[in-house]
C-alpha cells in the first residue's frame, strides 16, 4: 500500500472525504484484497491506494469515467480542456447545451471518452456537484455559475496510473463482491437510507430501496461468515440500526456536515460506521 493519496476527480453526494480520519482509524491492520462495491467519487480508495483492489458502482456513466481515465487519460484530458476552453460567454446556456448532449448520449448508451469528458465537465459546473437523474434516467441538475477548470492534469495522470492495477465493474454489489474471501477488506459506502421515508432522491434510476438495504444487510452477514473484514457507512437511521444491531457488530455514531442540504440548519447529521471485526 502506498502512503500518498490522490484527489478524487469528481465531487459526489454522500462522498466520504470528511469521514476519512474515522474510517482510517477503524481499518483492519492487515488485509488481502480490497473491495469497494459502491465507489462513487472514490474518496476512500484514492486516500488508501490499496494494492489488489476492485471497485464497482451501479452508475454506468460514472464507471465509464474511471475506465476512460485508466485507458486513455491523454484523450480524456484533451476533450475536457476543449469543453472548458470553448465555454460560451453565456455559461449557463453552454451548460444546458452540453447537458442535453450528455443526456442524448445516455439515451443511446454511448459510453465513450466523450461521455466521460462531458460527465466531469457537468459535475464541476452543476449545483453542488450532485449527480441526480429523473425518472427517465436523465441528468437534471441545474448550473452553478462557475467557470473553473474541470480537471487537473497531474491528478488525472496519477489516477490513471493507479487504476492500471484495479479491477473496475459496473453492476450489482453482490456480483462485484462474489469472490471476496477470508482476510479481504470490504468498504461498503451503501446508498443512503432516506432520512425522510417519503422523499427519495435516487442517484441512479435503478434506485436503492428498502428491499436493497435488507439484501445488503443479509450479504453483510454472509461476508462475515466467510471471514471478510467489513466496514459499512450510512445515515444513522432506524432502518439501518434495525438491520445491523442484533449481531455483535460494532456500531459507532459519528457526526458529519451535510453539504448537499439546502437548508443550513439541517447541515449537521449523524452517520454510522459499522464494523464486523
Image: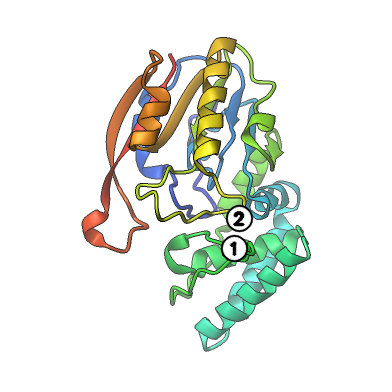
Query: Quarter of the image holding residue 100?
Result: bottom right
**From this viewpoint, is residue 24 visible?**
no
Q: Is residue 20 above or below residue 101?
A: above
Q: Residue 76: give x, y in percent of width and height.
A: 70, 60
Q: Is residue 262 above or below residue 270?
A: below
Q: Quadrant of the C terminus?
A: top left
**Do residues under tags 1 and 2 come within 8 Å of each other at their CB atoms?**
yes
Disc number for residue 205 = 2
Q: Residue furthest bottom?
A: 89
Looking at the image, residue 5 sits to the left or right of residue 247; the answer is right
* Count of marks overlaid on the render: 2
Residue placed under numbered mark 1 in the picture? 135
Mark 1 falls on what kind of element? Answer: loop
Q: Residue 184: give x, y in percent of width and height.
A: 58, 18
- Which residue is more in the foreground, 273 or 10? 273
Q: CA distance from mark 1 to mark 2?
A: 6 Å
Amino acid at each position: 500500500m502506498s502512503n500518498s493519496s490522490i484527489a478524487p476527480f469528481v465531487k459526489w453526494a454522500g462522498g466520504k472525504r470528511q469521514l476519512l480520519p474515522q474510517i482510517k482509524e477503524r481499518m483492519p491492520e492487515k488485509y488481502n484484497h480490497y473491495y469497494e462495491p459502491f465507489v462513487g467519487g472514490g474518496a476512500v480508495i484514492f486516500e488508501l491506494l490499496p494494492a489488489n483492489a476492485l471497485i464497482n458502482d451501479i452508475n454506468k456513466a460514472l464507471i465509464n469515467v474511471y475506465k476512460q481515465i485508466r485507458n486513455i487519460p491523454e484523450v480524456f484530458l484533451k476533450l475536457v480542456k476543449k469543453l472548458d476552453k470553448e465555454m460560451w460567454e453565456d455559461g449557463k446556456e453552454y451548460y444546458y447545451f452540453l447537458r442535453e448532449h450528455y443526456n442524448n448520449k445516455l439515451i443511446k448508451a454511448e459510453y465513450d471518452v466523450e461521455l466521460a469528458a462531458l460527465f466531469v465537465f457537468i459535475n464541476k459546473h452543476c449545483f453542488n456537484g450532485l449527480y441526480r437523474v429523473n425518472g427517465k434516467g436523465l441528468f437534471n441538475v441545474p448550473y452553478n455559475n462557475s467557470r473553473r477548470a474541470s480537471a487537473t492534469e497531474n491528478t488525472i495522470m496519477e489516477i490513471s496510473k493507479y487504476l492500471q492495477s484495479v479491477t473496475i465493474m459496473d453492476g450489482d454489489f453482490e456480483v462485484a463482491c462474489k469472490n471476496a474471501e477470508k482476510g479481504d477488506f470490504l468498504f461498503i459506502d451503501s446508498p443512503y437510507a432516506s432520512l425522510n421515508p417519503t422523499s427519495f432522491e435516487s442517484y441512479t434510476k435503478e434506485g436503492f430501496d428498502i428491499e436493497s438495504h435488507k439484501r445488503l444487510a443479509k450479504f453483510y452477514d454472509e461476508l462475515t461468515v466467510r471471514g471478510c473484514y467489513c466496514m459499512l457507512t450510512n445515515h444513522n437511521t432506524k432502518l439501518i440500526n434495525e438491520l445491523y444491531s442484533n449481531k455483535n457488530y460494532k456500531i459507532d455514531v459519528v457526526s458529519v456536515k451535510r453539504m448537499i442540504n439546502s437548508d443550513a440548519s439541517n447541515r449537521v447529521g449523524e452517520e454510522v460506521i459499522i464494523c464486523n471485526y
